[in-house]
Image: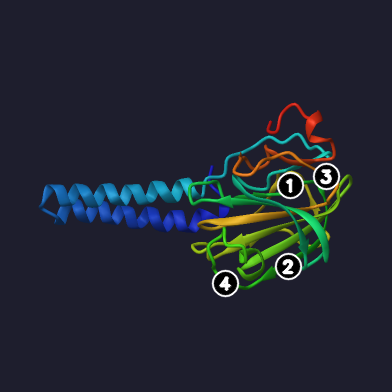
């Protein structure tokens, strides 16, 4: 299953790869060069297909947990002052997505969307400390039953040149459902209340809509960090 944001790119890539394979087959006489071009074209197609994959994940909605909005690696867990919306201290958890990760953004919790804003910006590498405030990004705030307002931010990286955000103010977010997409390498930041229990560790690999990032239940009381 592939994400709808990749349909046009996949079709164009498939066409170009087919043309390359056919031209190489009929117009290149050197066997190793012909084979090399055909293999390279197929590798490009496979990379595009794997980047836009959209695995279906069954989510049992849980108001006590914040789930990972994306696949990737936890690169930041710290207390910071969030200056765009809250203007106070929050717990920040940041997840870096490499080009080989699934790049679908999923709602980390259920609730009503109070704020959704796009910001043009730079294209610093996604793990740069200033990428959260200077890169192209979108900010979404969800009002949840147990955590109150939580914020997640899609951040473009050095390769990512388009952020897709489906969240609109007034909509109802459903935990685990498709909230957008970031093309070709990126990062997502979560800003959570200070009193929630963070259930992941630095450098931990997380799975979107599966791994619990934070909970109203204390970490010591949870048997598993992921499920």
Q: Secondary structure at mark 4?
A: loop
Image check: 117 left or right of 100?
right
Outermost residue toward the top in this view: 223
Please give the name of the residue rendered at 65% of the width and 59% of the height, measured from the top-left corner: 154
The residue singled out by tag 4 in the image is 122
Image check: 14 left or right of 156?
left
Q: Secondary structure at mark 2?
A: strand
> Up-down: is 220 above or below 99?
above
CA neighbours of label 4 inside 10 A, class few (<14), some (14 to 19), many (20+) = some
Q: CA distance from mark 4 to mark 2?
A: 16 Å
> Up-down: is 118 above or below 183?
below
Q: CA distance from mark 1 to mark 2?
A: 17 Å
The residue singled out by tag 1 in the image is 108
Please give the name of the residue rendered at 72% of the width and 36% of the height, measured from the top-left corner: 59
Percent position of residue 167, x then y: 73, 58
- Judging depth in this view, the residue of 75 and 27 nearest the camera is 75
- The colour mode here is rainbow
Percent position of residue 226, x then y: 68, 33
Query: Which mark sits nearer the N-terminus, 1 or 2?
Result: 1
Q: CA distance from mark 3 to mark 1?
A: 14 Å
| Discs 4/2, front | 4
> Residue 46, which numbered label?
none
Query: Which mark sits nearer the N-terminus, 3 or 4?
Result: 4
> Residue 196, which numbered label?
3
Query: Which mark sits nearer the N-terminus, 1 or 4?
Result: 1
Query: Which mark sits nearer the N-terminus, 4 or 2?
Result: 2
The residue singled out by tag 2 in the image is 117
């Amino acid at each position: 299953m592939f994400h709808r944001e990749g349909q046009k790119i996949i079709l164009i890539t498939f066409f170009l790869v087919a043309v390359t394979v056919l031209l190489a087959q009929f117009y290149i006489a050197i066997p190793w060069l012909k084979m090399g071009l055909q293999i390279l074209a197929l590798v490009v197609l496979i990379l595009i297909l794997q980047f836009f994959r959209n695995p279906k994940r069954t989510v049992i909605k849980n108001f006590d947990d914040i789930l990972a909005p994306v696949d990737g690696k936890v690169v930041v867990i710290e207390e910071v002052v969030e200056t765009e919306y809250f203007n106070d201290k929050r717990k920040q958890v940041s997840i870096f997505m490499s080009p080989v990760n699934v790049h679908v953004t999923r709602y980390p919790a259920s609730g009503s969307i109070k704020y959704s804003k796009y910001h043009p910006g730079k294209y610093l590498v996604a793990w740069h400390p200033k990428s959260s405030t200077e890169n192209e990004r979108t900010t979404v705030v969800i009002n949840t039953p147990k955590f109150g307002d939580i914020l997640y931010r899609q951040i473009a990286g050095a390769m990512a040149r388009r952020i897709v955000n489906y969240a609109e103010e007034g909509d109802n977010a459903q935990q685990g459902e498709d909230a957008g997409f970031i093309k070709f390498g990126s990062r997502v930041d979560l800003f959570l209340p200070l009193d929630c229990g963070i259930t992941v560790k630095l450098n931990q690999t997380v799975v979107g809509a599966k791994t619990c990032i934070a909970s109203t239940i204390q970490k010591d009381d949870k048997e598993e960090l992921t499920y």
